[in-house]
Structure formats: structure tokens, C-alpha cells
Amino acid sequence: MAWTKYQLFLAGLMLITGSINTLSAKWADNFTAEGCGGSKEHPFKHPFLQAVGMFLGEFSCLAAFFLLRCRSTGQSDSNVDVQQPFNSLIFLPPALCDMTGTSLMYVALNMTSASSFQMLRGAVIIFTGLFSVAFLGRRLAPSQWLGILATIAGLVVVGLADLLSKDDSQHKLSEVITGDLLIIMAQIIVAIQMVLEEKFIYKHNVHPLRAVGTEGFFGFVILSLCLVPMYYIPAGSFSGNPQGTLEDALDAFCQVGRQPLIAVALLGNISSIAFFNFAGISVTKEMSATTRMVLDSLRTVVIWAVSLALGWETFHPLQILGFLILLTGTALYNGLHRPLLSCLSRGWRPTQEGEHERLLGDSRTPINEAS
């Protein structure tokens, strides 16, 4: 079945905005500028401030939800309105998970390449599957267990490629290892977040845009307030600002003032996350979750290609192998092999059908139609 123009638009929007989200964050990290008080030029390493911007983008999804609800007012077949009353505070725990996981990922993005960062995020499949079994009482199909094993193998290959593509200095190697481990840790937290979201969204019949926007509100407010104590918490070599603290938002604003392109990168990150969430939810609704998974995999390819073209990273053949293994694991876990097997089965059956027609006469009714 051919896609409609609207479906093509949604698919393109998801692919483009999803790619921009990671690339804009990495672009901001690559800038160097003077900070406050005439400090010398230094890299823009402000992961917690970037996380605040990401939550601002998620918060804007609430506006999209209320616009959709206003447009659907009076339509009997609308599914935008919440069917059951719920307390918004139920989304505070997943918001805290999102806040922690996102902050860790932005810290890790400073330590690794954009393509490896995106590939390693595939680890969320492993922990989502295990937690859904442990906490939601689900039973995974054999293909899903195979998908988890393939994902683990893919992560090992991608991590190895990430190490081999870096310098041989101990500092670089330790930085890469730390970054990769932080991404894996973040995916454990994100998996917990996804399990909680699924439980609350289906229990209270909450529209996904409203859930994302509510979490964005909590994350934006809490993390913005946390920037104040972070300004005074010493972080030593872990810090990326001259003051040596966990986060120096004032230094970030000074750097933005001296290098306006950083503001462009940050705005790209904020706006892209809002459109990406809207497009992703719409793709799942209009097409399927499988389509969303395929587009998300294509996003990794786009990020990888752009990073190589801009010279942000060097090519290593192992990344191709790692990506293909991860793609296989994701496809198995999400059941993408089923439509492929079905297509192959349909392609095989007509041949058999033809043979039966020649043997049984001129009947044109498939003998296996009922199945």
C-alpha cells in the first residue's frame, strides 16, 4: 500500500528532526569560545544546560496536545481527550528517570562520536525487554530474546570500533570507555522510564503527547532549579568549565554571547526534540511502530554520514558491522522479521498454487485461503 503525502511528510519530519536533534547537540559541543570574566577560550561543555533545553522542547508538546484537542472538539471519533482523570504527578517518577538519563547522555556525547552515541542508544532494547518481563509480567518471544542477544553483540562491536578509532593515549581511551559506559547506564534508566510510561499511559488512557509534555514540564522545572547548586558543586577533571564545577550556566550564557552559532545549535536541539516527538507519535498512529523503528534506524545512518562528511569523526569498518548487528537485533525484537517472512511465504505460495491448479483443474480459489 502506497503512503499518502501526509504519511511521507511525517516520515520525513521524524527522520530529519531526529537527526538534527543529535547533530545539533554535538555541533554545540564542538564550539570553543571565551567564558565569563575574560576567561580563555574553552569548549562548550554544558550537558546539564543542554538537557534543560531538551526538556523545554518536550514541554512544548503540551501546546501541541492542547491545539489538537481544540481542533478535535466536537468530533465524536476523536481520541485526543483523556478518557480517565489522572494526577499529573504520576509522571514525576518517569520524568526523574528521563532527567537523569538525558543528563548522562549529554555528558557522554562530549566523550564519544555522534554516530557511536546514536548506535549505543540501541542498548535500551535489552533493558526494556528485561524490565518488562520483571515488572510487567510479560513473556518475550524467542525472536525477542535473539534480538536482545544480537543487540549485546552489536554493542560490543560498536564499542570496540569506537576505541580503535580514537588516539592511543590513555586519556583518550579512558574518556571513550567512560562515555560508552555512561550511555549504557543512561539506557538502563531510560528503560525504567519507558516501563513506567507504558504502565501509566495505558492505565489512565493518557495521550502520548500529553505524557511527553508533562514529563518535559517536570524535567524543565526540576533541572533548572538544580543548576543553582550545580554551580557550587566541585567536579574536578569531570568538569568542562573554568570554574571546575558540575555545571556553570553563567559561563554557558557568556559563551553563547561571544559565539552566536552556539545559540543556533541549542535552538535546533530544542525545536527538533519537540517536532521529533510529535512526528514519532504520529508515525506510530498513522502507520505502525515497525515503521517508526525503521525510520529511527535510518536516523543513525544520517547522523553517521553527516558526521563523516563534516570531519567530526573518522571512519572505521567495524562500525558498519556493529550497526548491521544492532539493526538485526532491533528488527528481531520489534518483530520486523514477521512481515518479511510473510512476504516470502506469499511469494512462495502462488507457485505451489499454480501446481495445484494444473493438477486439480481450473479452480482459481487458493486452497490455503482460510489460513
Image (cartoon, grey):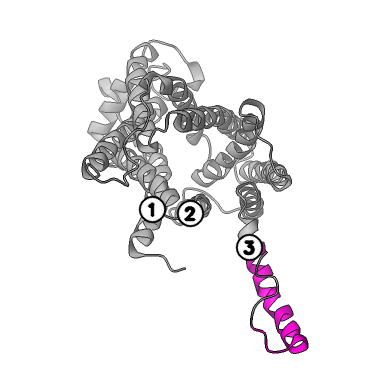
The residue labelled by disc 3 is 340
Cβ atoms under marks 3 and 1 closer than 8 Å:
no
The secondary element bearing badge 3 is classed as: helix
The residue labelled by disc 1 is 16
Foreground disc of the pair 2, 1:
2
Question: Which quadrant of the structure image shows residue 73?
Answer: top left
The residue labelled by disc 2 is 295
Q: Check disc 3: other Cα within 10 Å, few if <14, some if 14-19, many if 20+.
A: few
Q: Check disc 2: other Cα within 10 Å, few if <14, some if 14-19, many if 20+.
A: many
Q: Relative to 297, is 230 above or below?
A: above
Q: Check disc 1: other Cα within 10 Å, few if <14, some if 14-19, many if 20+.
A: some
**Residue 127 falls inside the magenta stretch:** no
The picture places residue 311, in percent across and down from the top left corner, at 46, 52
Please report the residue visible at 28 percent of the width from the left and 21 percent of the height from the top.
Answer: 250
Give me the C-alpha separation between circle 2 and circle 1. 10 Å
The picture places residue 299, in percent across and down from the top left corner, at 47, 52
Which amino acid, by three-letter code, is at mark 1?
Ile
The magenta-colored residue range is 340-364
Magenta highlight: main SS: helix
